[in-house]
Image (cartoon, rainbow, N blue to C red):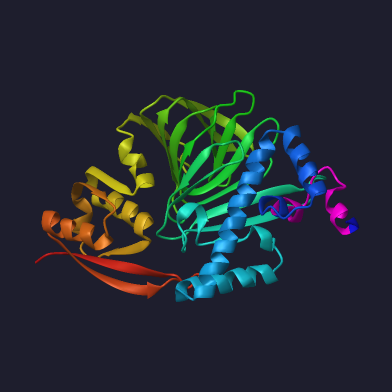
């Protein structure tokens, strides 16, 4: 009993106690203590729910690995073990390939404690693996959808004044309304922020692009340009508006749009309406984790219209071939990252 008591003397239980509570193996004393801890703060229920989800994902990962079902999964497993040896991720919070119903190679979750300011900031980072999409709940109940390759970091416990998260890539947010605690998404190394109280919006900000795109579905958002930590401009969007912010020039353009074209990806759909081919290829590149090599520059002057739901890349390319007279070849290559995950290069040429 003394050994168990060590984990619950402080105001915060450690993960071992919470995991025993989740798995219904906690002692009576631990159950009583955690029940009281949950009653003291309603937000802690979301913390416990997230821990339960991550723990379930980790245990599912172990079961899949034991079946030796995919060599690719084993490569991810070896990568996780290398990260563990670097001692920057707590093993309890590691999960790959099985978050929210997608069991193989969809999401990687990492967790660490960031020291240096007195209390330790507990940060969770979720990454939608290449070619996959995922969604999950944040501590306040906000739902976040991540597109392929996108990364979202957030604190396990929000600051009392704000709910701040950091995004690289593309995400759709259904933000829980809380006027006392604004929800803030920081992108582009904090050179731009999207600030809301409760709303639904899509946000796209990739590291290799100078453009940040925000599409508002409902509610209102404030787009804040930041320089040296100070807000230098603030623009308010209305529903059905899309703002395109050029980080390098500081310019912003706003247009009224059909938001479905920017948000359909979260449901497995791709929608194009008279879209320039370079933009089409960019969306396909992120969605399917492929690279495009355009051999004939005239192809970049074409435009494309079409809607595709749960289609393979080859099916979309076949449609493009028929409608735009563009021939293609697909070559599989090994990516240059440490995951060992394969991606493809698609070569496009004008049909002769």
Looking at the image, is 158 positioned above or below residue 208?
above
Query: Which residue is nearer to you in this view: 162 or 47?
Result: 47
Is residue 314 found left or right of 214 in the rendered image?
Answer: left
Specify whether 185 is left or right of 29: left
The residue closer to the viewer here, 248 or 96, is 96
When the figure is inspected, residue 292 is found, relative to residue 262, above or below; the finding is below
Q: Given the current orientation, which residue lies at the most extreme right position?
A: 2
Is any part of residue 99 visible from this angle? yes
Taking the image as drawn, is residue 89 in sight?
no
In the picture, the quarter occupied by the N terminus is bottom right
Q: Quadrant of the C terminus?
A: bottom left
Looking at the rendering, which quadrant does residue 47 occupy?
A: top right
- The residue at 23%/63% (across/down) is 314
Q: Position of residue 174 (x, y in %)?
A: 48, 35
Residue 81, percent from left and from top? 63, 71
Q: Main SS type for the magenta part? A: helix
Q: Is residue 184 magenta?
A: no
Residue 16 is a magenta residue: yes
Farthest residue to the left: give it: 352
Looking at the picture, does residue 244 appear above or below residue 235?
A: below
Please report the residue visible at 19 percent of the width from the left and 48 percent of the height from the top.
303
x, y (%) of residue 171?
46, 44
Read off the magenta span.
3-19
Name the spot of residue 100 as percent of width and height, x first.
49, 52
Rendered residue at 50%/59% (across/down) = 98
Q: Residue furthest front?
A: 28
Is 219 left, or right, of 60 in this rendering? left
Q: Between residues 225 and 113, which one lies in front from this camera angle?
A: 113
Q: What is the count of numbered marks?
A: 0
């Amino acid at each position: 009993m003394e050994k168990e008591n060590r984990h619950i003397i402080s105001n915060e239980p450690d993960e071992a106690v919470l995991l025993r509570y989740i798995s219904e193996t906690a002692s009576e004393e631990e159950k009583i203590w955690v029940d009281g801890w949950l009653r003291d703060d309603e937000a802690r229920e979301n913390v416990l729910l997230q821990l339960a989800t991550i723990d379930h994902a980790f245990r599912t990962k172990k079961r899949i690995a034991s079946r030796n079902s995919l060599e690719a999964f084993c490569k991810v497993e070896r990568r996780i073990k290398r990260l563990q040896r670097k001692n920057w991720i707590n093993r309890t919070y590691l999960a790959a390939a099985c978050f929210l119903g997608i069991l193989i190679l969809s999401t990687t979750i990492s967790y660490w404690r960031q020291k240096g300011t007195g209390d330790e900031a507990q940060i969770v980072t979720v990454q939608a693996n290449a070619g996959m999409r995922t969604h999950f709940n944040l501590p306040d109940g906000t739902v976040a959808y991540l597109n392929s390759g996108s990364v979202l970091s957030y604190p396990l416990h929000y600051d009392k004044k704000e709910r701040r998260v950091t995004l690289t890539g593309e995400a759709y947010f259904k933000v829980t309304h809380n006027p006392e605690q604004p929800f803030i998404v920081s992108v582009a190394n904090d050179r731009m922020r999207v600030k809301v109280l409760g709303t639904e919006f899509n946000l796209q900000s990739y590291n290799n692009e100078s453009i940040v795109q925000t599409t508002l579905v409902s509610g209102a958002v404030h787009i804040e340009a930041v320089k040296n930590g100070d807000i230098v401009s603030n623009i308010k969007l209305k529903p059905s508006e899309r703002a395109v912010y050029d980080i390098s020039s500081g310019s912003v353009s706003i247009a009224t749009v059909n938001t479905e074209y920017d948000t359909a990806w979260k449901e497995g759909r791709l929608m194009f309406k008279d879209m320039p081919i370079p933009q089409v290829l960019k969306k396909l590149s992120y969605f399917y984790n492929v690279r495009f090599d355009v051999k004939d520059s005239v192809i970049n002057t074409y435009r494309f219209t079409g809607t595709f739901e749960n289609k393979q890349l080859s099916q979309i390319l076949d449609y493009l071939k028929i409608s735009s007279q563009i021939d293609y070849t697909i070559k599989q290559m090994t990516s240059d990252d440490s995951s060992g995950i394969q991606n493809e290069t698609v070569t496009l040429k004008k049909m002769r």
